[in-house]
Image: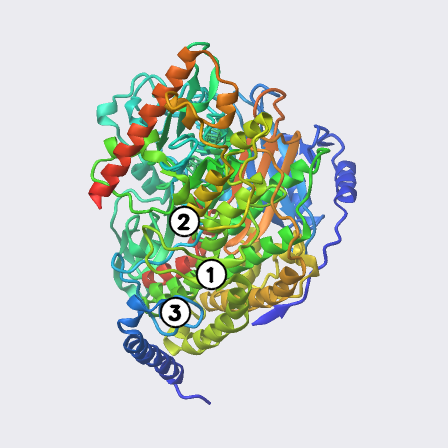
Amino acid sequence: MVIAAPQTVDVDVNAVIDKLKEKFPEAVKNDTRQGYKGVIVDKSKLVEVATSIRDEFGFDYLSSATGVDYLGIADEMEMVYHAYRTTGGPALVFKAQTPRDNPEIPSLIDVWPGVDFQEREVWDLYGIRFPGHPNLQRILLWEGFNGHPMRKDWKEAYFEEDHKPFESRWPAGHVHRIEEKNAYGHNVMYPADLDLSRLTDTSEESLYNSLGLGVDVQDLTGEGGIKTDRLVVNLGPHHPSTHGVFRMVVTLDGETIETLDPVMGYLHRNHEKIGERNSFLQNMPFTDRLDYISSMSNNLGYALAVEQLLALGARYQPPTYRAEVIRVLMAELTRIVNHLWSLGFLLNDLGAFFTPMLYANNEREKILDFFEATAGSRLMCNYMRFGGVFKDIPERIHSVVNMVNDKVRDYNTMDYLTEMINERLPRFMDEYERLLVNNEILKTRTVGVGVLPADRAIAYSTCGPLLRGSGVAYDIRRSDPYSIYPELDFDIPVGQNGDIYDRFMVRVYEIRESLRILKQILPRLERTKGEEVVSKFNYLGRVPIGESYGRVENPKGELGYYVVSAGDEKGPQNPWRYHIRAPSFINLTALGPMSKGYKVADVVTILGSIDIVLGETDR
Amino acid sequence: MTMYGQGILRGLTITLRHLVRTYFNDMRYMGKKYFNQSEFELRQGMKTEGIYTVQYPEEKIAVPERFRFTPFLVVEDADHPERPGEDWCTSCGICAKVCPPQCIWIVRGEDPVTKRPIPEPQAFYIDIDICMNCGYCAEFCPFDAIKMDHDYEMASYDRTTAHIHDKEKLSKPFSYWLNIAPTTANEEAEARGSWEHSDTVKSKKKAGVPSVAYTPTTDPSQVMQMIRATMPEPAPAAEAAPTAERSAAAVAQAGPSAEDALKAERLRKRQEALARKLSKEAGSQ
Ligand code: SF4
Ligand code: SF4
């Protein structure tokens, strides 16, 4: 285990853009739209420019690739890419545009293999084709789905109005239950020749075809002339080891994995479309439901993205120092909550059923008690606001006798936090490490299994403990810092071998580092007592025109929000584009390559070591 | 050179210790946690050891004051001297607008004669199936009229009839709010500067009548006492009983009698509904 030194963050993106324009005078031009950043690249030169961005300018890490539909504004579709250097620094944003009818943009999969799932998602939701992509299939919806739902002219079932608040709620509130509207009525688009009574799904067939399998079982002659069968095994979607409704289609040669294809989307609810109907503020509680283990830091990422936009306007009050302190307190506690959860479940996946899990959960409950007393909820915290937080931390964690409680609790919040951070959690971590880190069974099952080398980890755009376990010291809190992290003293743990054990250890050390941060937070909390933390943002507040990309180091990896405000002059505002760069989703790109050659029992552990949550993967 | 299996053995001693500690703790707390307040607090706090299970539904985790489940509407208590059972909600519509899943429906109150909006909702519905428990309605209501409830035991066998809450079901007296969230209720009263509704404060000010200034308390009956103490001498005219119950401001600006009669009618209906509800609740317990 290596503890990495803090990184440098000095990158002059404008100088890079100038050089890029010099090199490709016709293909690259500045994005001059109001509030936009970066460059627009001619799509015919996109692969060439991208290669140069990666190789010559050193932006080796493609964080996010997503589409936007500018129907009614420019009548174009756009791909937006955010590239970073793994040594730290701000983003180089570049875009490629394509007409709305027959949209097509060359695939960047040869430059950054990490765009694989993201391009499939854009094809699925926007219908932009990516020539050069080897397996351009729908990823979140099923193959037979009609239309591309993120397009601005696509209306969902139960469509009411273009944006909230809906007219029918007030002043004449006609209450109805949503099922009273016919789901197969006129507001759902189906192809004219579709017979709803015999709705069939062709996903299976095309899935197996993409794996190169005509039949399910084939005879193979393995090493030493032993005849083995090639077998297709479906792990999931309803298998406890998949941590949710997630499915892996694996082809086995004996016990050894040949290929692995993740199948997802079972929990897809088109979160982003919902988000584009919502007002800016209304999205906040929805972000809780992404990675529902770490709702506090989901909130933070979204707040940062919108605050970037608000900062473009005149009347924006940034969060006070105390608000920032509380945000970091919550984010780091969330990291501990998440890692306790994932360490516990990794042991479950190994067969150490529920003992380590419950020990970890016991501590997690204590933190959730604090969340509940502060934000009102244990999981769906909905705590951050633009320019502040919902409310200051309460003086006492206090319950009263009422119809559901006959027993009450009453603790001083600062004492509670101090004891938890200074004593209880460190004591627990000592014990937990003694319990696990030298356990021979754990080591045999994890050391050297599921290896992901550093260069592949970067190429696949992986993030979080998965990336750092492979030895890349990339942590947004250091390499593209936000909030008050620059003034805090902490290190970035990284692994050396990129195997499951390293990821496990990175999480253990990250809990330690979080505790170190929290110890620095406590005196700051005392010092800033009484400072205002509640945001002044109006419930239908206006957000200036522009784009922003807010990213935080979530426990599971980089969580990014790409938000575009088109600045509707009249009426309430809603985001024109609201995209989530979900760490769980993109980390799964590496699952297939990582599993190749290992035994089928290891797959479950490899998946567990990525630490996915399906609320975020499927969105 | 360490022996293979040492790590496992060391781990097992920890599991053993947890096991033993859990039993010892259970024995130590046996019975006590049900009767002894401080033991219960200890058991659910930072100092507890071993693994423990909360035996729901016999035993429940105490929910903190800010806990939010579904919203309810604040109405005046039935024994309020001036406006018993009246809504705090002014049907301004802000909660319906801010609600992220749009599960609030409000029919704005309308004066039957002049057709002008009046500050009380005619109907108020919340679809509890859709409510995402975000708490925005309570956070953004400018009149402290909608609050998040602590009652999370709402499971029912029939969601088609049970899960759209109407005004009757949503309404809970102010004393209930002061009971479940004394700290927050005090903060809000302090911000309003009074224990009374901000509109009452305003109209009383206009009429030159003092309203109840904020004094910290967590006891609803004390609030009632304070309100009674500031009331003017009982009105001498006994025959205008419903009118006398109205606030002093309403008396000061008493309109045409037809309007008064309608208001009195509405008030009577509301009180009846409240009485029905209270008796129903009393019956079910
Ligand atoms: S915001 Fe408050 S006063 Fe306005 S309608 Fe809602 S509950 Fe009534
Ligand atoms: S809690 Fe949230 S979802 Fe529920 S009614 Fe209030 S605003 Fe709507």
Q: Please state the horizontal and vertical placement of residue B30, each as a whole percent of the image.
A: 27, 73
Evaluate whether residue A495 shows in this view. Answer: yes
Pointer 1 and pointer 2 on the same chain: no
Q: Are marks 2 and 3 in contact (CB under 8 Å)?
A: no
A282 and A607: which is toward the camera: A282
The answer to whether residue A171 is above or below residue A221 is above
Judge depth for marks 1 and 2 and give the one in front: 2
A276 and B93: which is toward the camera: B93
Q: Which residue is mark 2?
A: B180
A417 horizontally vs A143: left or right: right
Q: Chain of mark 3?
A: B
Q: What residue sits 58% from the left and 38% below the top? A: A562
Beta carbon at label 1 within 8 Å of ligand 2: no
**Marks 1 and 3, how far apart in space?**
21 Å
Q: Please state the horizontal and vertical placement of residue A38, each as a whole percent of the image.
A: 70, 37
Pointer 1 and pointer 3 on the same chain: no
The answer to whether residue A279 is above or below residue A461 is above
The kind of residue tagged 2 is: Ile
**Farthest residue, direction front:** B236
Mark 2 Cα shell of 10 Å, populated few (<14), some (14-19), many (≥20): many
Mark 3 Cα shell of 10 Å, populated few (<14), some (14-19), many (≥20): some
Q: Which residue is mark 3?
A: B38
Q: Quadrant of ligand 2?
A: top left
Q: Which residue is mark 1?
A: A367
Q: Please state the horizontal and vertical placement of residue B224, each as a whole percent of the image.
A: 44, 42
First in sequence: mark 2 vs mark 3: 3
**Marks 1 and 2, how far apart in space?**
22 Å
Judge depth for marks 1 and 3 and give the one in front: 3
Pointer 2 and pointer 3 on the same chain: yes
The kind of residue tagged 3 is: Ser
Q: Are marks 1 and 3 in contact (CB under 8 Å)?
A: no
Disc 3 secondary structure class: helix
